[in-house]
Image: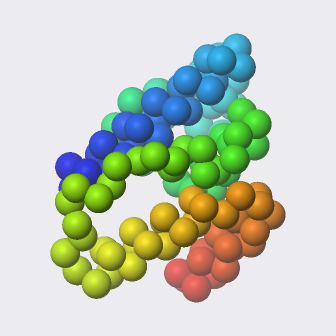
Amino acid sequence: MKELKEINKNIGKRIRFCRLNKGMTISKLAKVLNVSTQQVQKYETGKNKISTDKLIVVAKTLNKDMSYFYRDLDISEDVPKSKRERLCLQVAQNFAKIENEEYQVAINEIVKTLAK
């Protein structure tokens, strides 16, 4: 699970970097996400994993493609052991390559529906 924590940290750093570059306060982003400022801080430090639907909102708010948050992540060091872990990783990697935001939203809705 160490590698997932590193991914969360890297995604969080990118959120913080973009937020600060845009001149947005942590409380403004929290309001947009409908979470507490403490929760945004946990996302930005990687202590908590941000959900895909919230990351989509972050990407829209900060004028970034979703792929920006996943780009160049070194996730190959620890190869997932189970077939399910490998499949999840492949889905995440392929999702990050999709640049069309409408497609990303549609795919996320399909996955949420199937997960019920």
Q: Choose top left, top right, bottom left or bottom right for residue 88.
A: bottom left
Please determine whether, in this image, residue 100 is positioned above or below residue 108. Answer: above
Is 84 on the left-hand or right-hand side of 64? left
Asked if residue 16 can be seen in this view, the reply is yes
Is 109 on the left-hand or right-hand side of 92? right
- Residue 71 in percent (x, y) is at 52, 48
Q: Choose top left, top right, bottom left or bottom right for residue 80.
A: bottom left
Q: Which residue: 77% across, 61% down?
A: 100
Please determine whether, in this image, residue 102 is positioned above or below residue 106. Answer: above
Quarter of the C terminus within the rendering? bottom right
Q: Which residue: 61% across, 17% down?
A: 20
Q: Which residue: 47% across, 40% down?
A: 11
Asked if residue 61 can be seen in this view, the reply is no
Q: Which residue: 39% across, 69% down?
A: 89
- Residue 41 in percent (x, y) is at 46, 27
- Residue 102 in percent (x, y) is at 80, 63
Of residues 77 and 43, the one nearer the viewer is 77
Q: Choose top left, top right, bottom left or bottom right for residue 76.
A: bottom left
Quarter of the N terminus within the rendering? bottom left
